[in-house]
Amino acid sequence: MAILNGLTVSIEVNGNSLHEYRDHDSQEVRLDPMSEYIESFSSAAFAIRLSIPKIFSFTSDALGVFLYLDGTYVESGISEKGLHDYRFKGTFRVGEGGLGYKEFTLNEIKLEDSSSSKAKDPATSVLADLGTIAVQVFRMRIVESRIREGANRSVALDLRDELQVSEEELKGRSVTHSAKLGYKGPADSGPILTVYHRLGGFRPSAGRDAMRTEYVDGETSPLAVLKLKYRSRRPLQGLLLVSRTPTSSRSSTYVALKGRPFEELNAAEKDELVRRQQTRYRIEHESRVKLESGVKIERGIKRERDEEYEELMASASAKKVKGPIANGETVEISDED
């Protein structure tokens, strides 16, 4: 989990935290030490969890929490003193059917032909922060609490259901998924969050309690910025963060195969099991070939050293050498033909 100033952020799927990886050797991570990696997944809804330890020292009325998916602002909340566990499972939006709740999900990116691409320059669009879940935490001052507003929703979200980009626009980046909002139902089905506006400290909340707040340190001075980057398994293997040998405990495919009879697996799970076994066999075979090659090389070196030693001893025995014996006498050693 990403940790800064005692605050931790993790990603949960079905109530379970995903395993996180930290790249200690990456220059990108060194520049942003609060950046972790998780393995990307498709379709499954996820929650962003902010944990505040009980020993955390509040130096303001509350903490403002702002969520960004792929660089796009999606939701915010306020954490007052005494609230130590905060989960964001989605966001609220006004649509044709009124206020609706949309959950956070990831979706595979669809690659299209370069000539037909209409995406913006990655430097100025969602592509710039593609593959990143970011949480900004600010110290907030409560100006007015428990105010009630109508269903005005002023935040425009730009998360497309299916992101279509060209390989050229990705510029070789190892990103295969993008964030999306999946429709869950009416607002009543979503978590009750106390929210406020990103700019100016206030955001109307449809029929819910809200607060009027101010930034203690300014809008550009967060207390913490925590990031989680999602990547597919192959890029994580390329970063040497994930072993090339499949491990079911760390896999985000959600195919629980360990300890289950083969006949109980469905078609997809059987295919996954066969794929893992083939991958494991290939890796073991390559390792065995490399090991055997190394033994042959070592044996060749040893044989050369033995031959050199024999030649050296033969050369030495051809010469007369004087050497002491136990009683102090000296004898001559010579090689007689």
Image: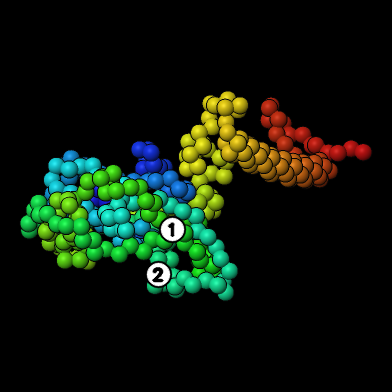
SS assignment at label 2: loop
Q: Residue furthest front?
A: 97
> Label 1, on which residue?
161
Nearest to the observer: residue 321 or residue 15: 15
Give the mark nearest the N terminus, 2 or 1: 2
Nearest to the observer: residue 110 or residue 4: 110
Residue 137 at x, y percent in the picture: 23, 55
Q: Vertical placement of 138 versus 126: above or below?
A: above
Picture disc at residue 125 = 2
Picture disc at residue 67 = none
The residue positioned 46% from the left and 53% from the top of the image is 107
Residue type at tag 2: Ser
Within 10 angstroms of label 1, few (less than 14), some, or many (20 or more) residues? some
Q: Vertical placement of 229 versus 243: above or below?
A: below
Residue mark closest to the camera, 2 vs 1? 1
Residue 230 at x, y percent in the picture: 43, 53
Q: Can residue 264 be seen in this view?
A: yes
Within 10 angstroms of label 2, few (less than 14), some, or many (20 or more) residues? some
Residue type at tag 1: Asp
Residue 291 at x, y percent in the picture: 68, 41
The residue positioned 54% from the left and 67% from the top of the image is 166
Q: Can residue 141 be seen in this view?
A: no
The image's colour scheme reads: rainbow
The residue positioned 28% from the left and 44% from the top of the image is 189
The residue positioned 51% from the left and 37% from the top of the image is 255
**Is mark 2 in CB contact (under 8 Å) with mark 1?**
no
Residue 193 at x, y percent in the picture: 21, 48
SS assignment at label 1: loop
Q: How much space separates mark 2 and mark 1, taking CA atoms?
A: 16 Å
